[in-house]
Every structure is written in C-alpha cells, then in structure tokens.
Image (spheres, rainbow, N blue to C red):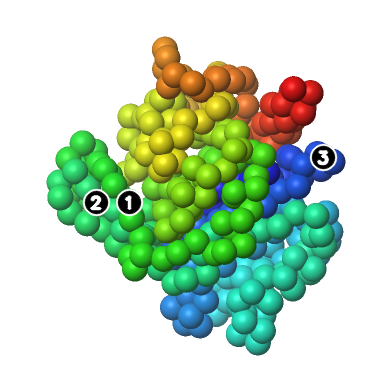
Amino acid sequence: MVSFGGGGGQSQILSGIKNIDFIDITALCTASDSGGSTGIMRKEYGVGGYLGDVSKCLWALSDKKKIENTLMHRFEKGFLKGHSMRNILYSALIEIHGEKEALELMHKIFGINRHRVFPVTFEKTSLQVKLKSGQTISGETYIDTISRNHLWEPERNRIIAAQLSPSVNIYSEVEKKIEEADYIVICPGDLFTSVVPSLLPNGVSKAIKKSKAKIILITNIMTKLGETDGYNVINFVQEINRYLSGKTPDYVISNNGKIPKELLEKYKIREHKVSAVLSDNIIPGSMLMASDLWTKDNKGHIRHDSDKVAEILKKIFETNLKN
C-alpha cells in the first residue's frame, strides 16, 4: 500500500493500519513545507521541506513508545522553542550523512523494518497557488494563513490551481513503489498545503496512471478557511481527481457521524471550520463508504478515529484478497 499526504492527517491513518499483518506500507510525504520548525530548519540549514512530515509519519509507524515519545517532544521555551526533538535529530543526520542515508537511519532509530516513509521528492521546491482573483501566492506557510489577511474574500480569493516552483521530479524509488502498489490511499489533510503538493512532482501522475492499484480517498471531516470554504465531500473528490491523471478513486471513505453542535460552534469561531457534509451523489465509478469516523483528541480537536478508519481499510483489503 502506498499512501499520500502531509504529516498530521496521514499519521493518523498510519497509526491505525500499521499492524495489519498482510499490508506493507510506503508513506509518501509532501516536500514543500515552509512553516514552523521545518521552515526554520529549511532556511537555516538547507534541509528539505519534508522534514516534519516524514518524521511524523515515522513516529506513527513506530512501536518504540519511549523513543518515539522522546523524539516527538517539542520545546516550549528558550532558543529551541517550537522545535521538536525529531526535527533536530533528523537535521543533524542530514548534515552529517546526507539525505538518503539520514532517512535510513531515522527508520532504524524509530525501529521500523517492514514499512517505509519517503518524501515524494528530495529536490528543493516551494508551493504556489493561483487564486480566482488572478493573484499567485508562494510558500506553504503564507498560503496556510491566507484567510488572516483582512482583505481576504472567500469567493474572490478561492484557490483554483496549485503548482511547485521550481518544477521537480519524483524520487525514482518512490516511482517504483507507486507502480507496484496494490492500493493507493489518499489521506486527509489540508487539501492545498498538504495533500495536493504530494501529487505535484513530475512523474507522480504518470506512475499512478501506470499502476494497477485500487485508489482509496479518505476525505476531510472539516473544511478549512482559505482553502476549502464551502466544500462538501464531492468537492474534495473532484479536486483530488484533477491530480490522478484521469483516474477515479475506487473507494471514497467519508464521515457521516454527527458532531455535537457545541463543538462545531467552537470550531467555527476558533478555526473558522465547518463540517464537510456528504453530498447526494458521488463521482460515478467510486464506491462511497460512509461511517461515523470522527473523534476528539485531548486538545479538543476533531480528528479521524484511526481504529475506525483502519477497520474499513482492512475490510477493503480483505475483500479484494478473496477476489
């Protein structure tokens, strides 16, 4: 199985399916992150924009609890404020050993043998999006906060296209993994700053088209102001469809669980997010698998329930094995 996405949404899915014994996972991450700790490390030390997402997915696939919890520690004060231990270690390994050997060492440190995590490309690039107004915005960190601009208008400033600048090529080993996959899973996450960028490097869509894999799309539970305003489930499917080289997802996994009104109101005020509701129809050729998939983490954030999503994915895998 090959999965696409950023770090947060993809890691939730990986943590639930990593122990399915008949599935080998290759997780592919975007390489254009320019925000937070990754952005600082990228600017100061020249590391790739995949640093945080790759290490977060490694954490999700690890069973070494004490080691993984230590590496996930994020400093809250001093000159290291905002940096995680995993990003510092990963950056040091890259500086000493180079990017590819550093990644192998990170797998060993996290105790991961069967599964693999890669950036979709090792080449340096940045994300650009074009708005309906005609304006182009560069840099994931700026795109991520577009709605904070007091001149921002949801319809006029809607994102209509995304690209990487400069254009970069898929990592050859990643290309091979996609072509040989039995399943391709598109994970949830911020659509234009986490999920779509992982599909943009040259060669990704060609490899997906060449692959005989069944494609599974797990749609977002919530919309995001500045990226997916007013989206319903079919809007997410249609947008992802643009980057799959003409292929349609075989399965669309979506939440139909009712989220308490008081929690939705808090989200609407605090993060300007609303539920991505199920539409009356879905793209022809896709099987909709709707279920109560949401949960709330210890910080009050709405998330996919990893175990519930894993149950659905396992059923899909087992059904196709029997056939």
In the picture, the quarter occupied by the C terminus is: top right
Give how far apart the Cα atoms at labels 2 and 1 are.
Answer: 6 Å
Q: Which residue is mark 2?
A: 130
Left-right relation of 46 to 56: left
Q: Which residue is mark 3?
A: 22
Label 2: which secondary element: strand
Q: Amino acid at mark 2?
A: Lys
| Vertical arrangement, residue 322 with respect to residue 43, above or below | above
Quick one: which residue is furthest to the front in this view?
210
Q: Which mark is residue 264?
A: none
Q: Amino acid at mark 3?
A: Phe
Q: Nearer the viewer, residue 312 or 268?
A: 312
Q: Which residue is mark 1?
A: 162
| Vertical arrangement, residue 88 with respect to residue 186, above or below | below
> Between tags 3 and 1, which lies in front?
3
In the picture, the quarter occupied by the N terminus is: top right
Identity of the residue drawn at 43% across and 22% down: 283
Give how far apart the Cα atoms at labels 3 and 1 are.
Answer: 36 Å
Q: Position of residue 212 (x, y in %)?
A: 59, 38
Q: Position of residue 49 (x, y in %)?
A: 49, 67
Q: Earlier in the sequence, mark 3 or mark 1?
A: 3
Label 3: which secondary element: loop
Q: Earlier in the sequence, mark 2 or mark 1?
A: 2
> Between tags 2 and 3, which lies in front?
3
Q: Quadrant of residue 268?
A: top left
Tag 2 near tag 1, CB within 8 Å? yes
